Protein backbone atom coordinates (compact mmCIF):
# COMPACT_ATOMS: atom_id res chain seq x y z
CA UNK A 1 0.00 0.00 0.00
CA UNK A 2 1.24 3.49 -0.87
CA UNK A 3 -0.05 6.86 0.28
CA UNK A 4 0.00 10.10 -1.68
CA UNK A 5 -0.97 13.23 0.24
CA UNK A 6 -1.47 16.60 -1.42
CA UNK A 7 -1.27 19.49 1.03
CA UNK A 8 -3.56 22.48 1.12
CA UNK A 9 -6.27 24.25 3.08
CA UNK A 10 -10.01 23.61 2.97
CA UNK A 11 -12.41 26.40 2.10
CA UNK A 12 -13.29 28.35 -1.01
CA UNK A 13 -11.08 31.27 0.03
CA UNK A 14 -8.04 29.00 -0.40
CA UNK A 15 -9.05 27.38 -3.68
CA UNK A 16 -6.51 28.06 -6.42
CA UNK A 17 -3.99 29.65 -4.08
CA UNK A 18 -0.31 28.83 -4.28
CA UNK A 19 -0.46 27.12 -0.86
CA UNK A 20 -3.04 24.66 -2.25
CA UNK A 21 -0.74 23.41 -5.00
CA UNK A 22 -0.62 19.93 -3.44
CA UNK A 23 -4.42 19.72 -3.51
CA UNK A 24 -4.53 20.86 -7.14
CA UNK A 25 -2.06 18.15 -8.10
CA UNK A 26 -3.99 15.39 -6.32
CA UNK A 27 -7.24 16.67 -7.90
CA UNK A 28 -5.61 16.40 -11.33
CA UNK A 29 -4.46 12.83 -10.69
CA UNK A 30 -7.86 11.79 -9.30
CA UNK A 31 -9.68 13.19 -12.35
CA UNK A 32 -7.27 11.48 -14.78
CA UNK A 33 -7.63 8.17 -12.94
CA UNK A 34 -11.43 8.56 -12.96
CA UNK A 35 -11.67 7.88 -9.22
CA UNK A 36 -14.86 9.87 -8.70
CA UNK A 37 -16.00 11.54 -5.52
CA UNK A 38 -13.98 11.17 -2.33
CA UNK A 39 -14.90 9.55 0.93
CA UNK A 40 -14.20 11.46 4.11
CA UNK A 41 -11.72 9.45 6.14
CA UNK A 42 -8.67 10.25 8.29
CA UNK A 43 -9.67 13.94 8.49
CA UNK A 44 -9.22 13.99 4.70
CA UNK A 45 -10.83 13.64 1.36
CA UNK A 46 -9.86 10.04 0.59
CA UNK A 47 -9.64 7.83 -2.50
CA UNK A 48 -8.22 4.31 -2.81
CA UNK A 49 -7.35 2.53 -6.05
CA UNK A 50 -4.93 -0.22 -7.09
CA UNK A 51 -3.02 -0.28 -3.80
CA UNK A 52 -2.65 3.50 -3.63
CA UNK A 53 -4.40 5.84 -1.21
CA UNK A 54 -4.76 9.50 -2.16
CA UNK A 55 -5.64 12.05 0.49
CA UNK A 56 -6.21 15.77 0.75
CA UNK A 57 -6.04 16.60 4.47
CA UNK A 58 -8.92 18.75 5.69
CA UNK A 59 -7.05 19.71 8.87
CA UNK A 60 -5.60 22.93 7.42
CA UNK A 61 -1.99 22.99 6.32
CA UNK A 62 -0.33 23.42 9.70
CA UNK A 63 -2.01 20.28 11.10
CA UNK A 64 -1.53 18.00 8.08
CA UNK A 65 0.33 15.51 10.26
CA UNK A 66 -2.92 14.49 11.95
CA UNK A 67 -4.45 13.23 8.71
CA UNK A 68 -1.29 11.68 7.27
CA UNK A 69 -0.36 9.85 10.47
CA UNK A 70 -3.91 8.48 10.87
CA UNK A 71 -3.79 6.95 7.38
CA UNK A 72 -0.23 5.68 7.80
CA UNK A 73 -1.01 4.08 11.17
CA UNK A 74 -4.34 2.56 10.09
CA UNK A 75 -2.86 0.88 7.00
CA UNK A 76 0.57 0.29 8.60
CA UNK A 77 2.25 1.99 5.63
CA UNK A 78 6.04 2.12 5.56
CA UNK A 79 7.25 5.73 5.53
CA UNK A 80 9.16 5.05 2.31
CA UNK A 81 5.75 4.36 0.73
CA UNK A 82 4.38 7.81 1.60
CA UNK A 83 4.67 10.74 -0.81
CA UNK A 84 3.82 14.28 0.27
CA UNK A 85 3.11 16.84 -2.49
CA UNK A 86 3.36 20.48 -1.46
CA UNK A 87 4.22 24.01 -2.56
CA UNK A 88 7.76 25.30 -2.10
CA UNK A 89 8.91 28.91 -2.32
CA UNK A 90 12.57 27.87 -2.53
CA UNK A 91 12.02 26.56 -6.07
CA UNK A 92 11.24 28.59 -9.19
CA UNK A 93 7.60 28.49 -10.26
CA UNK A 94 6.73 25.08 -11.72
CA UNK A 95 10.05 23.40 -10.90
CA UNK A 96 9.77 19.97 -9.25
CA UNK A 97 12.11 18.28 -6.79
CA UNK A 98 11.65 14.76 -5.45
CA UNK A 99 13.45 13.91 -2.21
CA UNK A 100 13.56 10.73 -0.14
CA UNK A 101 14.02 12.54 3.18
CA UNK A 102 15.31 15.66 4.87
CA UNK A 103 14.16 18.59 6.91
CA UNK A 104 10.90 20.44 6.36
CA UNK A 105 12.70 23.54 5.10
CA UNK A 106 10.36 25.72 7.14
CA UNK A 107 7.17 24.42 5.48
CA UNK A 108 4.59 24.16 8.29
CA UNK A 109 2.58 21.38 6.66
CA UNK A 110 5.67 19.22 6.31
CA UNK A 111 6.82 20.15 9.83
CA UNK A 112 3.48 18.81 11.13
CA UNK A 113 3.79 15.58 9.12
CA UNK A 114 7.41 14.87 10.07
CA UNK A 115 6.58 15.56 13.71
CA UNK A 116 3.50 13.31 13.70
CA UNK A 117 5.41 10.50 11.99
CA UNK A 118 8.52 11.00 14.12
CA UNK A 119 10.90 10.83 11.18
CA UNK A 120 12.62 12.91 8.51
CA UNK A 121 12.56 9.86 6.21
CA UNK A 122 9.37 10.73 4.35
CA UNK A 123 9.52 11.14 0.55
CA UNK A 124 8.23 14.43 -0.76
CA UNK A 125 7.58 16.09 -4.09
CA UNK A 126 8.18 19.82 -3.86
CA UNK A 127 6.38 21.98 -6.42
CA UNK A 128 7.96 25.39 -6.91
CA UNK A 129 5.81 28.47 -6.46
CA UNK A 130 8.69 30.94 -6.65
CA UNK A 131 9.90 33.50 -4.15
CA UNK A 132 7.50 35.94 -2.56
CA UNK A 133 8.01 39.41 -4.04
CA UNK A 134 6.69 40.87 -0.78
CA UNK A 135 4.94 39.55 2.31
CA UNK A 136 5.33 35.74 2.38
CA UNK A 137 1.91 34.91 3.87
CA UNK A 138 0.06 37.09 1.36
CA UNK A 139 2.03 35.47 -1.45
CA UNK A 140 1.49 31.82 -0.52
CA UNK A 141 -2.16 32.40 0.34
CA UNK A 142 -2.61 34.54 -2.77
CA UNK A 143 -4.22 33.34 -5.97
CA UNK A 144 -2.16 32.44 -9.02
CA UNK A 145 -1.62 35.34 -11.38
CA UNK A 146 -2.62 35.11 -15.05
CA UNK A 147 0.77 33.87 -16.26
CA UNK A 148 0.92 31.22 -13.51
CA UNK A 149 -2.63 30.03 -14.33
CA UNK A 150 -1.56 29.49 -17.94
CA UNK A 151 1.33 27.29 -16.76
CA UNK A 152 -0.71 25.19 -14.29
CA UNK A 153 -1.89 22.52 -16.79
CA UNK A 154 1.72 21.68 -17.70
CA UNK A 155 2.80 21.72 -14.05
CA UNK A 156 0.09 19.33 -12.85
CA UNK A 157 0.85 17.05 -15.82
CA UNK A 158 4.53 17.06 -14.77
CA UNK A 159 3.54 16.27 -11.19
CA UNK A 160 1.39 13.37 -12.36
CA UNK A 161 4.31 11.98 -14.37
CA UNK A 162 6.58 12.38 -11.34
CA UNK A 163 4.08 10.58 -9.09
CA UNK A 164 3.77 7.74 -11.60
CA UNK A 165 7.56 7.49 -11.75
CA UNK A 166 7.69 7.30 -7.95
CA UNK A 167 4.99 4.61 -7.96
CA UNK A 168 6.83 2.54 -10.60
CA UNK A 169 10.49 2.91 -9.54
CA UNK A 170 12.55 2.84 -6.38
CA UNK A 171 13.02 6.28 -4.81
CA UNK A 172 16.62 6.75 -5.99
CA UNK A 173 15.76 6.00 -9.63
CA UNK A 174 12.64 8.16 -9.41
CA UNK A 175 14.65 11.06 -7.98
CA UNK A 176 17.19 10.77 -10.78
CA UNK A 177 14.47 10.87 -13.44
CA UNK A 178 12.26 13.54 -11.88
CA UNK A 179 15.03 15.87 -10.75
CA UNK A 180 16.88 15.64 -14.07
CA UNK A 181 13.81 16.50 -16.14
CA UNK A 182 13.35 19.98 -17.52
CA UNK A 183 10.21 20.66 -15.47
Image: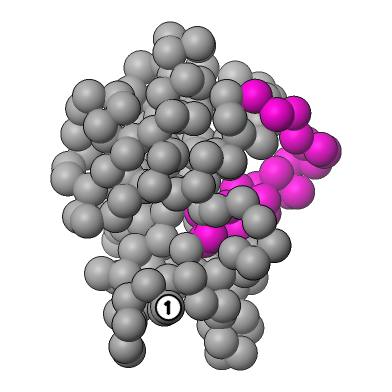
Query: Magenta span has 53?
Result: no
Magenta range: 20-41
Between 36 and 180, the residue placed more toward the observer is 36
Counting labels gives: 1
Residue 158 can be seen, yes or no: no
On screen, residue 106 versus residue 2, left or right, reads left
x 41%, y 78%: residue: 139
Between 71 and 162, the residue placed more toward the observer is 71
x 56%, y 79%: residue: 144
Residue 179 position within the rendered picture, expressed as x and y whole percent measured from the top left: 30, 58
- Residue 8 lies, with reference to residue 64, above or below; the image says below
On screen, residue 9 versus residue 127, left or right, reads right
**The residue tagged with tag 1: helix, strand or loop?**
helix
Residue 176 can be seen, yes or no: yes
**Which color scheme does this rendered protein use?**
one colour
Query: Magenta span has 24?
Result: yes
Residue 98 position within the rendered picture, expressed as x and y whole percent measured from the top left: 32, 50
x 32%, y 45%: residue: 110
Give the quarter of the figure containing the C terminus.
bottom left
Amino acid sequence: MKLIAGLGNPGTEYAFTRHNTGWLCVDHIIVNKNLGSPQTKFHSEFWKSDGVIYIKPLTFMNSSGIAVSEAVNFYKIELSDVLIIYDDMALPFGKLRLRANGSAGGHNGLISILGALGSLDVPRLRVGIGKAPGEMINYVLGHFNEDERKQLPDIVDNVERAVNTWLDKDIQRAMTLVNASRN
